[in-house]
Amino acid sequence: MPDNVTSLFRSTAAHSPSMAALTRESDGAGPVDFCIPCNPYFPTPAMFEEMAARLRDIITYYPSSADTITAELCSLLQLPPQCVAMGNGSTELITWIDHLLVRESLAVPVPTFGRWTDQPMETGKRVDMFPLQESSGFALDLAQYAEFIRARGTRVAVICNPNNPDGGFLHKHAVVQFMDAMADLDLVVIDESFLEFADAENEPSVVHEAMLRPNVVVLRSLGKNFGLHGIRFGYLVANPALAGRVRSMLPKWNLNSFAEHVVFMLKEHGAEYAQSLHQVRRDRMDMSGQLSSLPGLTVYPSQGNFLFVRLPVGAEGTVVRDRLLTEHRILVRECGNKIGSSSRFLRLVVRPQVDVRRLVTGLEQVLYGTSRRGAAVSEQATGTAYSSGTAAVDRLVSQTNGAGTRGLAQAAGAGMPLPAAASAPAVGPGGGMPVPAAAGLPQPEPQPVPQEAPRPQPAPQPVPQPVPVPQPVPVPQPQQFPQPAAYPEPAPQPAPAAPPLAPAAAFAAPAPSPAPAPMQVPPATGPTPPGVPARGGLTAAQVRGTDGLSMAPATGWPGAQSWPDAAGMGQAAG
């Protein structure tokens, strides 16, 4: 592909340009897509032919109401329609969850799907980001996450299972225990958008448990599972009060005619769908093995339809991404713009073996120098050299002269400084610029930097840092969670500095040493108006450097023996 197509990455607000944009800028043929997490085996060719034959009617006429389409989906999933709300993609549902059910603060592990961090900030909420540790393979320790939520006084908790981009998986019993431990929160969201690709447990979903609890919402995707991102449809499951509240705000025709046509086709194609999931899981194992054979490349365990990989030391993700695209017509997801990640990480979608062989060949040539441009990995690496790759963060850092989110919060007069991550800040290439860390963990006060002072020359060299070796992620056992505390929190106590987070070998009872006292947080006074920081947090305008005025168990599917049910995977065919 021509070199100029890579400029599309720098001219879009999204992490990657659309496939349509890439196709327009090339010779009319798009690249092999390892970026968008789509099921490559569904719909079947026969289903596409059927939709093509009905194209005129599908795009000419209005769809049925959302209630009609939802009722058909629920008849397949064997879920009560009053507990389900269908949306024009999961992003629409995340937006309404934020507007209707998140009052002032939300906690989410990072890295994760960007809308869970960006959407609440756009409406002035505080986002408490719990950093997943590379040293533990980005595994989420639910006990530590619960302690973090209590210490921050967060009112809404989010879990993505499996998590995007690393594919980390939590067993059902641990998720249910966490839901019950957080019963006093305003809301607990379990995002199961990629759960149907998991095979670590027969019935991993908590949809049935969510319907019985007053403050739990489960989010499910259809576009990812069915390989139809362009149709834009997904659904949430909750108790009738929560689901009805979201459903009442959705437009009458928020679902399009393509979504309706696909939903009404599904009951005749359950076996093909189950077979597609089975094939994706087999491809995931094969792809992981092939990528793991590349020197210096780390592949993390995944239960999604994607793999999270760390490039060899010295490789810059944006360079690897651009060269794979221009030299090999391969599109990958470089993760430098994900909070909690860096440009040393790629998310690679699981694809058929013929495509994986092409990817491996391209990576070999780009990384190890068998192409005309030489290697992307320096022979003598001097450190990890993480770069943020995030335009919004770059603007934030430039406005504060390197002081990061703490400096911006203090400049804005916020009452509570945003602390940095437990580990030392990574050094950016060439400029020594620290990557802004997630909020919520204590750090020393930064040295004041005059706003008008120019950046010192020459720039300091990156500090070598050892590359941590991911450890095997232990199978979670029943764990103890902090008991729900009355809201508002008790009187303030001295809060010692929290130690760096580390994965627990097992979820054991609390140690006899005294636990850190919870951070004193003022009581809630009602919903936070848009544009107003919640409890010392940052508004979206402050983070993005704008003026704030622009808009910123079931038995299976009827008629098919092998349909996965709404509570889990069921039995995959063949």
Image (tube, rainbow, N blue to C red):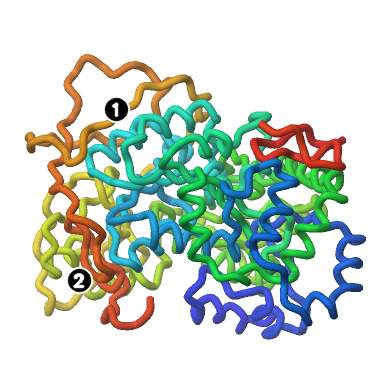
On screen, residue 291 above or below 474:
below
Viewer-side residue, 386 vs 72: 72
Circle 2 crowding by C-alpha within 10 Å: few under 14, some 14–19, many from 20: some
Query: With respect to residue 237, does 59 lie above or below?
Result: below
Residue 415, by quadrant, is: bottom left
Label annotation for residue 400: 2
From this view, report whether residue 449 is shown above or below residue 478.
below
Amino acid at dot 2: Thr
* Mark 1, residue position: 482
Q: Where residue 152 sits in the image (x, y, percent)?
A: 23, 44
Residue 196 position in % (x across, y down): 67, 43
Inter-mark Cα distance, 2 to 1: 37 Å
Q: Crowdedness of circle 1 by 10 Å Cα count: few (<14), some, many (20+)?
A: some
- At horizontal 20% and vertical 25% (from top left) the residue drawn is 515
* Residue pictured at 29% horizontal, 19% vertical: 510
**Horizontal side of residue 144 vs 170, given as left or right:** left
User: Does 362 sit left or right of 92 as displayed?
Assistant: right
Disc 2 on helix, strand or loop? Answer: loop
Can residue 343 be seen at all in this image of the molecule? no
Residue 143: percent from left, percent from top: 36, 30
Q: Is residue 89 visible?
A: yes
Specify the amino acid type for callout 1.
Pro
Q: Is residue 159 left or right of residue 23?
A: left
User: Which residue is drawn at the image coordinates 33% and 67% (left, top)?
Assistant: 123
Query: In the picture, residue 498 is in which quadrant?
Result: top left
Q: Nearer the viewer, residue 491 or 438?
A: 491
In what element is the residue under mark 1?
Answer: loop
Q: Is residue 219 left or right of residue 358?
A: left
Of pointers 2 and 1, the one earlier in the residue sequence: 2
